[in-house]
Every structure is written in structure tokens, then in C-alpha cells.
């Protein structure tokens, strides 16, 4: 059944200036938060009763800002996830420094979380203020230190090519999180998205701080610094000390089925799992002929979900992929990973996609976007920098249109 479980918390203390994630500014004492968490707990139990979480190996409570829930509610949700999916070995909670109080750390650890992913973004006060973050650098340092002291694995999210950032301040941020003991670092260039404060301010301006060359240079700077300190880059944006790779994210990138619960959470299910879910959620449409994989996104808002948590009451948007489309998707996801495309993955895709696959792979090798390493085809640095071309070419192998539906 689903190998990975995702729980979405769509609440934040305030919207950051660049953020277009599914979250809304919500007061920590808003009764909606408690009602929403209880609804997720009810859905966990329903999914477990359906057998959808048998064999589930990882869980991730993301957002939004899960730490905004406070220790009692977040600990309760972690316990409920543990009870619903007892085989989970890695359970991550996302957190922001300003709400990662000691009581939250204690409660989630006690409840069975094994890993924290902390939205640090920068250790420079002026940069943090520009991003609209609620914490300052000192708070981030203190909270990461406290998280590391609990013994849970700690990851820090960092952002580059942001306003006011310089090569020197970026190096200080990277050095800073390493000195605090983080064992995993995710590094993202700022994307200026429509509908955000940054989008309104800079949408058409192509600001110099976010130039693609600056993004590439900062990503290379991060790579040199992190690899020089013993971190392994295992995905385009992810670095880990040995043994600290995020198993949950690897499940996403290797085409493993996953179940997402909560507003705007996504699931990817094979046909058998989808049909099992249909038993509890009869509003789901029949899969189309040839459908081999279903991608579902919960469209029910937090208030409606809290009012009626039954799976049969959910509104969802759906995409159905045929087996060849799923094979193209797996190739595209595999190209995010340092390990790249294994021979078994390529052979399986060749059987479904035919000679077009070899033409595309040769072209990507000729253009220096992929390279051969042993019997694997791996993304090159250039391939990652030109990610849209690399991923677009592999997804372009998918024949026909993806079938969409809503219910
Ligand atoms: S804390 Fe994260 S999810 Fe919330 S607004 Fe900021 S970037 Fe978005």
C-alpha cells in the first residue's frame, strides 16, 4: 500500500513575502486549528481501517507551519500517525523557529517524531526581514541548537538569490547551520511567484538579486561548501551527512505510492490502492481505461474538512496516468536524484515508451544534461541548472493527454 504518508497543516502565523504554498495566516488560538487536527486524526484512522497505510515506511507533517499547533496538538497528531501506520521508521515534522518552543520539541519527540525540518532560510537579520519571516537569526540559532539537543535528526531549509543576500552572507548562513549541528540541508533559489508580495513588487522586474546566473552561482557555492564539510548531495536541492538522507522525499522521487491527508495534500496511488479508496469515497470517479496511476489533491478547505472529516465528504481534483505516462514521470523524478536513472528503471520505461526513449536519452547525453556513470544515467550539474529542459524532455516522452477529473 502507500509507502509514505503526508499530513498537511495549512496554517501559518503570517504569510511570508514570497510564499504561494497552501497556507493562510491563522492565530495560534483559533479553534479551527484544533478542529482541523481532530479531523486529520479521524481520517488517519479511516485510512488505516481501509488498509491504505499497511507497509507505510515514512510520514511527514508539513505545511504551512506544523509547529504553530503547539506541543499538545502536534504531539497528538504524531501519535495518531504512529497508531495508524505502526511500520513508520522515519517521521518528520516541519517547524519554524519562532514557534518551535521547548514544549513542542518535547511533545513531538515523546510522540515518536524522529526528524525535524526547520525553515531557517537565512541567518542574516536584514535578509530575514526582507523575506517577511517572523524569526531573527538568533532565534533560529537557538531553536536549531535546541532541536539538535533532543537527538532527533535535524534538517534546515535555506533560501538563496534573495534580496540583500551576498556571496559572503550566504557563506555565513551555510557555515552557521553546519556549526549548529544540522545533519541535512535543503537549498532552494527564491522563486518569485504571482499572487505573493514579492510577485507584486518584482513580478516583471527581473531583479538582479534573483538573476538565473546568481541562482546558479549560489547553488554551486552551497555545493562546494557542503560537500567540503562531508555532506552528500543526493538530490538537486538536498544534502545530507551519511545516513541522514530524507527517506520520505526519496519515496516521492522514486515513484513510490504515497497518501496525503489535509487541505491541498496530494496522493499518488496505483490502481489497486485507488480502487480501495473508492470503497470509502464513492464520489471518486471510475478510473479511465488504461489508467495505471492516480494523482489526487484534496480541494476541501480547512473549515469544511474540520466540519466533516469523512473521506466520503472530500472534494478532490484528480489526474490519471497511463502506464507509459507513469514511466515518463518516474524518469523525470529519477533525474532529480544524484543516483539518476538505474538500468532497471530505463528498461521498464523502454518496454512502455519504445524507441523514442533511446532517442531522447541520446539527445540529453549529447547536450550534456545527462552523463553515464557506471550503468546509471545521472544528471549533470548543467542538467540540474537547466532542470526545466531536462525534466521537460523526459516528461515529453509521455504519450497522449493526462486524464483530469474533479469530484
Ligand atoms: S512559514 Fe512557510 S508555509 Fe508559512 S507563509 Fe512562510 S514560507 Fe509559506
Image (tube, grey):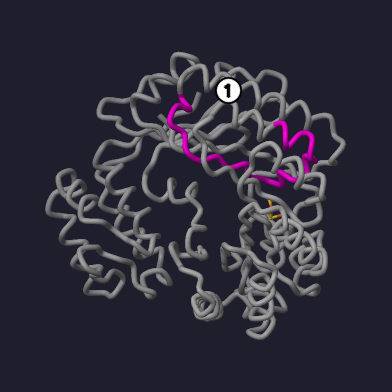
Tell me the magenta residue range: 52-76
Q: Say if 202 sits above or below 269 in the image.
A: below
Q: Is residue 133 left or right of residue 380?
A: right
- In this rendered view, identify the residue nearer to me: 174 or 283: 174
Label 1 sits on a secondary structure element that is loop
> Which residue occupies the extreme left position in the image?
355
Q: Is residue 33 left or right of residue 278?
A: right
- The structure residue drawn at horizontal position 18% and vertical position 55%, both measured from the top left corner, is 357
Q: Is residue 91 left or right of residue 400?
A: right
- The structure residue drawn at horizontal position 61% and vertical position 55%, both measured from the top left corner, is 153
Query: Where in the figure is residue 270, as x and y percent of width and height?
Result: 35, 31
Query: Where in the figure is residue 3, as x and y percent of width and height?
Result: 43, 36
Whether 73 is among the magenta residues is yes
- In this rendered view, identify the residue nearer to me: 348 or 181: 181
Whether 72 is among the magenta residues is yes
- In this rendered view, identify the residue nearer to me: 388 or 199: 388
Query: Where in the figure is residue 322, as x and y percent of width and height?
Result: 28, 36
- The structure residue drawn at horizontal position 72% and vertical position 31%, both measured from the top left corner, is 76
Find disc 1 in the rendering and name its residue.
Answer: 314
Query: Where in the figure is residue 371, as x and y percent of width and height?
Result: 26, 71
Amino acid at each position: 500500500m502507500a509507502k509514505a504518508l503526508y499530513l498537511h497543516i495549512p496554517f501559518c502565523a503570517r504569510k511570508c513575502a514570497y510564499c504561494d504554498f497552501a497556507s493562510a495566516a491563522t492565530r495560534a488560538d483559533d479553534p479551527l486549528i484544533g478542529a482541523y487536527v481532530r479531523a486529520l486524526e479521524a481520517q488517519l484512522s479511516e485510512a488505516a481501517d481501509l488498509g491504505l497505510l499497511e507497509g507505510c515506511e515514512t510520514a511527514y507533517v508539513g505545511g504551512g507551519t506544523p509547529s504553530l499547533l503547539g506541543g499538545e496538538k502536534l504531539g497528538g497528531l504524531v501519535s495518531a500517525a504512529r497508531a495508524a501506520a505502526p511500520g513508520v521508521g522515519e517521521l518528520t515534522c516541519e517547524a519554524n523557529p519562532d514557534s518551535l518552543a521547548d514544549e513542542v520539541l518535547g511533545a513531538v519527540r515523546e510522540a515518536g517524531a524522529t526528524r525535524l525540518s526547520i525553515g531557517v532560510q537565512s541567518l542574516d537579520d536584514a535578509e530575514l526581514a526582507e523575506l517577511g519571516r517572523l524569526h531573527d537569526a538568533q532565534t533560529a540559532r537557538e531553536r536549531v541548537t535546541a532541536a539538535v539537543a533532543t537527538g532527533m535528526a535535524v534538517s534546515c531549509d535555506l533560501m538563496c538569490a534573495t534580496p540583500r543576500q551576498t556571496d559572503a552572507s550566504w557563506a555565513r548562513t551555510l557555515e552557521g547551520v553546519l556549526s549548529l549541528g544540522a545533519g541535512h540541508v535543503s537549498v532552494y533559489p527564491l522563486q518569485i511567484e504571482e499572487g505573493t508580495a514579492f510577485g507584486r513588487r518584482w513580478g516583471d522586474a527581473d531583479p538582479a538579486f534573483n538573476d538565473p546566473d546568481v541562482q546558479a552561482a549560489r547553488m554551486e557555492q552551497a555545493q562546494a561548501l557542503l560537500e567540503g564539510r562531508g555532506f552528500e548531495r543526493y538530490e538537486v536541492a538536498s544534502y545530507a551527512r551519511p545516513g541522514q538522507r530524507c527517506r520520505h522525499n526519496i519515496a516521492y522521487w522514486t515513484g513510490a505510492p504515497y497518501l496525503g491527508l489535509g487541505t491541498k495534500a496530494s496522493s499518488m496511488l496505483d490502481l489497486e490502492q485507488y480502487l480501495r479508496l473508492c470503497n470509502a469515497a464513492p464520489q471518486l470517479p471510475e478510473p479511465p481505461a488504461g489508467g495505471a496511476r492516480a494523482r489526487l489533491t484534496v480541494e476541501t478547505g480547512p473549515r469544511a474538512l474540520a466540519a466533516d472529516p469523512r473521506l466520503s465528504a472530500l472534494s478532490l481534483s484528480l489526474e490519471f496516468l497511463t502506464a507509459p505516462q507513469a514511466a515518463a514521470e518516474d524518469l523525470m523524478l529519477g533525474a532529480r536524484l544524484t543516483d539518476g536513472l538505474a538500468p532497471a528503471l530505463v528498461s521498464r520505461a523502454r518496454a512502455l515508451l519504445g524507441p523514442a526513449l533511446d532517442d531522447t536519452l541520446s539527445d540529453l547525453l549529447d547536450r550534456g544534461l545527462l552523463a553515464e556513470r557506471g550503468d546509471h544515467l545521472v544528471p549533470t550539474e548543467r542538467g540540474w541548472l537547466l532542470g526545466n529542459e531536462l525534466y521537460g524532455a523526459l516528461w515529453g516522452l509521455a504519450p497522449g493527454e493526462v486524464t483530469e477529473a474533479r469530484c
